[in-house]
Image (cartoon, rainbow, N blue to C red):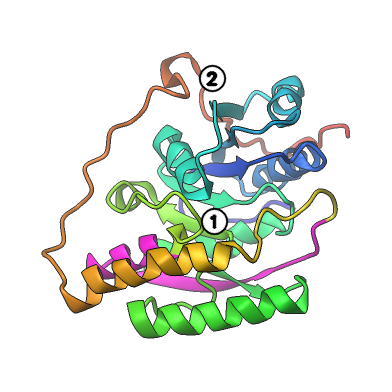
């Protein structure tokens, strides 16, 4: 059943992927089907972050008219992949999710419900299905950054977020790694951007392996401390980020945003 949205909008969904050949086809197919139920024009941008497997080839072979592949020749990191996808987006709203298929993307409708008042909407995972160790580390990290950076959100690293595009262009991340979420939310707070939250469903990764490891904890902390110092201890005047749109997606050659149909057709698996 098509979800009714208050106003007509368009959506770019950015999906960073690194060595996700086991799950990328399923993730893209599910994303396309879910976005078709929102009743808005949309595109899906898969950013292959230097994968050494068949991730990029699988996306290319799907030949969906509204799915676009952007490639990094080498692995640059999660934050860098997100930035590339953000700069390739053309819709007036931009969302991102991971390529592991752990979210029900129909829940983007819940995030859109907040956009009458909020320019950014951050999901938080209901009944999170990750192993207990990862949930524990995430709980501690969220406590820490709420205290140090005043992010004010309950699940900073939830990989289902929605941004008004013009606001997103002012907070494009400079962090290449997993600190990217905290960086963007903190910068948005400093600019006075209204941030809403919505609960979203979560499920276990069905195929492939998580790219988050214990080694990411000290890497993230090494980024957190100097960022906290620059933002909270010796803050400088807030400047909007000057961004350059890379010609990675060749937007002039891309098809128009996929338009909604009155009765979206399901694609064959």
Circle 2 sits in a helix, a strand or a loop, which is it? loop
Residue 202 in percent (x, y) is at 73, 67
Q: Residue furthest right?
A: 269
Q: Quadrant of the C terminus?
A: top right
Closer to the camera, 252 or 183? 183
Q: Is residue 66 left or right of residue 115?
A: right
Residue bearing mark 2: 255
| Magenta residues, start to end | 182-205
Number of callouts in the render? Answer: 2
Which residue is more in the foreground, 125 or 236? Answer: 236
Mark 2, other Cα within 10 Å: few <14 / some 14–19 / many ≥20: few
- Please state which of the two labelled residues, at mark 1 or mark 2, is closer to the viewer: 2
Question: Does the segment drawn in magenta span residue 204?
Answer: yes
Q: Quadrant of residue 60?
A: top right
Q: Is residue 52 left or right of residue 266?
A: left
Tell me if label 1 and label 2 are in contact, CB under 8 Å. Answer: no
Q: Is 116 inside the magenta-drawn segment? A: no
Q: Residue at x 49, y 53 (%)?
A: 177
Q: Residue at x 68, y 77 (%)?
A: 135
- The correct choice, above or below, for 53 with respect to 209 in the image is above
User: Residue 153: percent from the left, percent from the top?
Assistant: 46, 77
Up/down of 246 relative to 133, above or below: above
**Residue pointed to by mark 1:** 5
User: In the figure, is residue 179 to the left or right of 226?
Assistant: right
Place residue 39 in its image quadrant: top right
Q: Which of the pair 269/74 is nearer the observer?
A: 74
Can residue 113 be seen?
Answer: no
Side of 35 relative to 127 (left or right): left
Q: Residues within 10 Å of mark 1 (few under 14, many from 20)?
A: some
């Amino acid at each position: 059943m098509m979800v009714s949205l208050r106003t007509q909008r368009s959506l770019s969904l950015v999906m960073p992927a690194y060595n996700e050949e086991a799950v990328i086809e399923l993730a893209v197919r599910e994303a396309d089907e879910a976005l078709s139920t929102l009743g808005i024009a949309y595109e899906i941008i898969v950013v292959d972050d230097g994968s050494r497997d068949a991730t990029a080839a699988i996306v290319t072979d799907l030949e969906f008219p509204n799915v676009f592949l952007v490639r990094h020749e080498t692995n640059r990191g999660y934050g860098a992949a997100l930035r590339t996808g953000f700069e390739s987006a053309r819709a007036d709203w931009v969302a991102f999710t991971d390529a592991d298929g752990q979210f029900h993307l129909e829940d983007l409708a819940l995030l859109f419900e907040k956009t009458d008042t909020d320019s950014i909407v951050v999901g938080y995972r209901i009944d999170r299905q990750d192993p207990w160790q990862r949930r524990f580390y995430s709980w501690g990290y969220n406590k820490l950054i709420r205290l140090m950076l005043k992010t004010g959100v309950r699940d900073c690293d939830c990989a289902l977020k929605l941004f008004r595009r013009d606001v997103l262009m002012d907070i494009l991340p400079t962090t290449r790694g997993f600190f990217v979420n905290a960086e963007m939310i903190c910068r948005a707070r400093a600019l006075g951007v209204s941030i809403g939250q919505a609960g979203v469903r979560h499920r276990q990764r069905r195929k492939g392996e998580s790219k988050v490891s214990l080694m990411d904890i000290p890497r993230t902390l090494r980024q957190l401390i100097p960022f906290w110092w620059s933002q909270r201890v010796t803050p400088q005047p807030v400047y909007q980020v000057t961004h350059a749109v890379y010609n990675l997606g060749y937007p002039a050659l891309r098809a128009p945003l996929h338009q909604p149909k009155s009765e979206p057709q399901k694609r064959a698996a």
